[in-house]
């Protein structure tokens, strides 16, 4: 399916550019997309990948990955029946989903790429997406998250009275898109058109059972001193969470006092609307704020407590980061060039005009169509369209709230598929694209219905 979509985007872009006299813009967009794929996305990702793959290496060697996988084993076994319960892929996927829910984009992508690498180790058909890979991509493209931070930020910057009011609607809509994505991927994998080809010569299905978690058995039991240190660290993070979530003014004062004592020039301050938020919203944001520091502190501490050589293992895991970033460049270039050309040729605007008469009778605002069509293609493009939508209709308008909910309940499907599958050289994506687009459609429909019920 991705072959035909990519070909259609490129050919239509050239045709529309020629008809509208925008061939120059189409050509410029193609070369700009190449630069964006390499300079803006792939190279910065190499550093981030190195950090998180190093941390994941520590989690594997210390046994933390197995602990995470066991905690959610019933759900994960139902979602991924082809993946052995104790395989590292289970823990990697759990961590990726948790990062996505908290809106930790810098952590979610590297963890997701690591999960794809773990799933590829179970793949008996190189270059072909497995059922587990497609299910994992469907969950990622359905974009389940607690706080759509970017969207809330745009509304806040535009002067919305209550920019966090869309958190609830986005969460309900993203549940709908996730459920739709899971149902779609589980149904489509059974169709003959998407059936898996025969396994490669020399491999068979039994190889998936022959595995061992790297470093398993090396870690030693925790000693009493290390247990006390870990408990103390957990208590510190728990105290920080309670203070930030329930006593933000006290935390701000404490932080300012510490900074003054250390003669730090930059004054710490919460966003102006922080103290006025509901405690639940503050709690979720406190988790997001503390999540990465918690992981970067507790994982190495736990690994050290299990007598894992933390520096050596971190460096060993980080070595893979640059290789993964380089590997995804061709896939990024291919998808971003096609999307950039189509957008520059006016394809998104043309589709919006053609589909507008169909959606108007369904009480679907035609003003949302450009955003809906751009969302699966480009994150920066959809952010720009949403910002324009907010400016044109006002941050507190029904259309702006619908757009914000759409942004919070859908994902840049084609980008996610290109990056994740590109990291393991998957060319036959099978039903992953269809399931991702079905999840996006469900999220859009749910967003409009929920916002009409809540805000109208």
Image: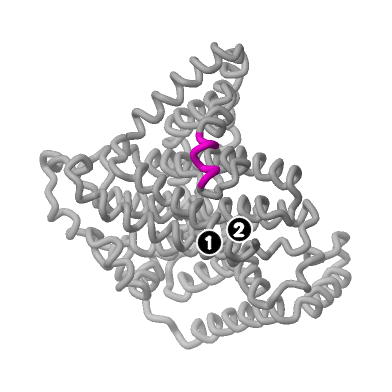
Name the residue nearer the viewer: 151 or 257.
151
Marks 2 & 1, CB-CB < 8 Å contact: yes
x then y, percent, for residue 201 = 11, 39
Q: Report which residue position mark 1 lands on.
A: 145
Q: Which residue: 49% across, 57% down?
A: 446
User: Which segment is the magenta one?
Assistant: 355-361
Count of marks placed on residues: 2
Name the residue nearer the viewer: 404 or 354.
354
Q: Which residue: 36% across, 54% down?
A: 136
Please identify the quarter of the rendering in which residue 343 is found: top right
**Residue 38 in sight here:** no
x then y, percent, for residue 246 = 71, 81
Q: Tell me if residue 94 comes above or below residue 33 in the rendering.
A: below
Q: Which residue: 42% across, 74% down?
A: 306
| Numbered tag placed on residue 148 in the rendering | 2
Under circle 2, the secondary element is loop
| Label 1 packing within 10 angstroms: few (<14), some (14-19), many (20+) | many
Viewport quadrant of the C terminus: bottom right
């Amino acid at each position: 399916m991705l072959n035909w979509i990519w070909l259609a985007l490129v050919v239509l872009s050239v045709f529309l550019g020629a008809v509208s006299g925008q061939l120059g813009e189409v050509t410029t967009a193609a070369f700009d997309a190449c630069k964006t794929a390499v300079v803006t996305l792939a190279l910065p990702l190499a550093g981030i990948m190195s950090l998180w793959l190093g941390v994941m290496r520590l989690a594997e060697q210390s046994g933390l990955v197995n602990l995470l996988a066991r905690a959610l084993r019933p759900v994960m076994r139902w979602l991924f029946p082809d993946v052995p319960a104790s395989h590292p892929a289970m823990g990697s996927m759990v961590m990726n989903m948790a990062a996505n829910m908290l809106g930790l984009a810098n952590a979610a992508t590297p963890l997701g790429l690591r999960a794809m690498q773990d799933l590829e180790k179970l793949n008996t058909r190189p270059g072909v997406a497995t059922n587990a890979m497609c299910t994992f991509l469907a969950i990622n493209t359905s974009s389940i998250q607690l706080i759509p931070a970017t969207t809330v930020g745009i509304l806040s910057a535009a002067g919305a009275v209550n920019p966090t009011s869309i958190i609830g609607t986005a969460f309900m809509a993203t549940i709908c898109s996730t459920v739709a994505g899971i149902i779609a991927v589980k149904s489509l994998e059974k169709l003959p058109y998407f059936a898996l080809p025969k396994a490669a010569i020399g491999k068979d299905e039994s190889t998936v059972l022959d595995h061992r978690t790297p470093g398993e058995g090396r870690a030693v039991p925790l000693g009493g001193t290390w247990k006390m240190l870990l408990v103390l660290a957990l208590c510190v993070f728990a105290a920080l969470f309670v203070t930030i979530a329930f006593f933000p003014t006290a935390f701000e004062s404490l932080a300012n006092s510490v900074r003054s004592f250390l003669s730090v020039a930059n004054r710490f301050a919460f966003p102006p609307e922080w103290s006025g938020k509901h405690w639940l919203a503050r709690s979720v944001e406190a988790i997001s704020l503390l999540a990465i520091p918690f992981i970067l502190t507790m994982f190495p501490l736990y690994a050290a407590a299990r007598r894992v050589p933390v520096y050596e293992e971190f460096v060993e895991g980080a070595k893979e980061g640059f290789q993964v970033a380089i590997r995804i460049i061709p896939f990024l270039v291919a998808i971003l060039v096609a999307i950039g050309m189509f957008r520059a040729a006016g394809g998104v605007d043309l589709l919006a005009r053609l589909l507008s008469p169909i959606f108007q009778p369904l009480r679907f605002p035609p003003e949302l169509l450009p955003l809906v069509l751009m969302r699966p293609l480009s994150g920066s493009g959809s952010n720009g369209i949403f910002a324009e939508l907010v400016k044109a209709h006002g941050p507190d308008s029904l259309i702006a709230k619908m757009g914000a909910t759409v942004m919070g309940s859908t994902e840049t499907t084609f980008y996610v598929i290109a990056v994740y599958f590109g990291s393991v050289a998957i060319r036959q994506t099978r039903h992953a694209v269809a399931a991702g687009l079905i999840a996006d459609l469900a999220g859009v429909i749910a967003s409009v219905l929920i916002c009409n019920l809540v805000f109208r």
